[in-house]
Image: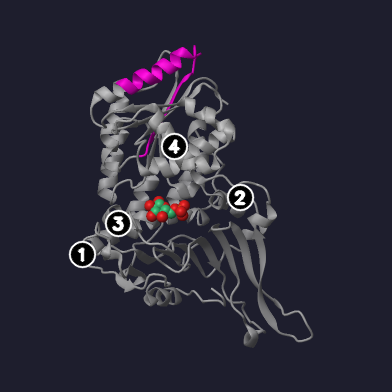
Amino acid sequence: PETGCLSIIVLGASGDLAKKKTFPALYNLYRRGFLQSNEVYIFGYARTKISDDDLRNRIRGDILAKMLQSTLKMYQQIKYVSGSYDTEDGFRLLDKEISEHEVSKNSAEGSSRRLFYLALPPSVYPPVCRMIRKCCMNRADLGGWTRIVIEKPFGKDLESAEKLSAQIGELFEEPQLYRIDHYLGKELVQNLLVLRFANRFFLPLWNRDNIQIVFREDFGTEGRGGYFDEYGIIRDIIQNHLLQLCLVAMEKPVSLKPEHIRDEKVKVLQSVLPIKDEEVVLGQYEGYRDDPTVPDHSNTPTFATVVLRIHNERWEGVPFILKAGKALNSRKAEIRVQFKDVPGDIFKCQKQGRNEFVIRLQPSEAMYMKLTVKQPGLEMSTVQSELDLSYKQRYQGVAIPEAYERLILDTIRGDQQHFVRRDELKAAWEIFTPLLHRIDDGEMKPLQYQPGSRGPVEADELLAKAGYVQTHGY
Ligand code: BG6
């Protein structure tokens, strides 16, 4: 591991993302001993005029319930600098503070390691990156690196994403850029590669009827209506988080090197055929427009089911059904692989349902297989049962790290495997841009659905048309 000074600079330190995700993740990393060295310093930067202590108290207030005595020390390693996002003064001041810290530690070669975390709206990414480039690069005399972490949304469609990529690409090289999609930090998403390529019995079996990738939330857009209405469920969830789960569809990479893995992801995304209108169902929950920050005639979908078709040898004829919705009947994210019917099935009349392999990302991480067994007892009848690997039971006492925690640590270590590469981002936008433009132009409209329901019934009909056979209890 590298040693020497590490500065983590959270830009947008007084905002919501920093409060909910970035600082708690840093806190957890500290608690686990990854940031304990007194050569690690955390800088907050934002426009709000507050003091170091104000920022410390805010963070402390947010995570107080979990706080341990030993982490009180962490607060002495936090500093705040206030400044705007597009002028040099603030960034020069920030650079001065970081440099003072680096020099005061009598740092050795390689000690100017600067991680800039942009917990900011994407509209300010270009000016902020320009300012960092101009005023805050790591000190050449101390060596080390400068890395930039950015959050989605990376643009609104192919064109705007490409423009943003080009603007940032002029300032920083691809190995310096870490585009976060926090789904890639989830335990069971990280497990996908192992599952697919380290298990002999999944190799031939990965031949199935249909695959569903599902995201449901049982709450609406409360408090975020303004942001959400500009983006909608496809940009907020499907084009990024759900598409990243295409890890289930990729071929075996040459090695575990991040570039090899990302090459395979790009290939599978590039093999997706254009989406057909008749394989899309959009929904908007009743009451969504009551939010004062949402326009009265909003056409923005809060629900979507989209069927993707992958044109390659392995996946020809196997629909990938991506489904995401807000204000539904449950909170769940899962990948559901449904297998074909047994050929020449002799138990036909007692058939309970198809075999399925389910990877549940949340809540309660689990992997289970639905299979048919003989109902125990004297009668010869069948019943659907599960082979169940529930993480809570199997790994009792093992704490599963938060996605952000893992990803920030990867950034410190310089591992880009779980970050979105520029060509991958482009391929993802290419898939959805035509559909998004049709929605933006009002050519496709969402159907209304009841909050707390499964979404529009038309979505279940589309699922059935794509080949999904509803099984008992789902
Ligand atoms: C975010 C979306 O990226 O992911 C939110 O902007 C969504 O709308 C959230 O609620 C879901 O993340 P998780 O980890 O709770 O599934």
Q: Which mark is residue 59?
A: 4
The boundaries of the magenta stretch are 93-119
Name which of mark 3 and mark 4 comes first in the sequence: 4
**Disc 2 marks which residue?**
194
Of helix, strand and loop, which one carries label 1? loop
Name which of mark 4 and mark 2 comes first in the sequence: 4
- Residue shown at the point (27%, 57%) measured from the top left: 229
Name the front one of labels 2 and 3. 3
**Disc 3 marks which residue?**
225
- Residue shown at the point (26%, 32%) measured from the top left: 85
Can residue 270 be seen at all in this image of the molecule? no
Find out if the beta carbon at label 1 lies less than 8 Å from the nearest ligand 1 atom.
Answer: no
Of helix, strand and loop, which one carries label 3? helix
User: Residue 422's quadrant in the figure?
Assistant: top left
Residues marked 2 and 3 touching at CB (< 8 Å): no
Which residue is more in the foreground, 194 or 305? 305
Residue 112 falls within the magenta-colored stretch: yes
Q: Residues within 10 Å of mark 2 (few under 14, many from 20)?
A: few
Residues marked 3 and 1 touching at CB (< 8 Å): no
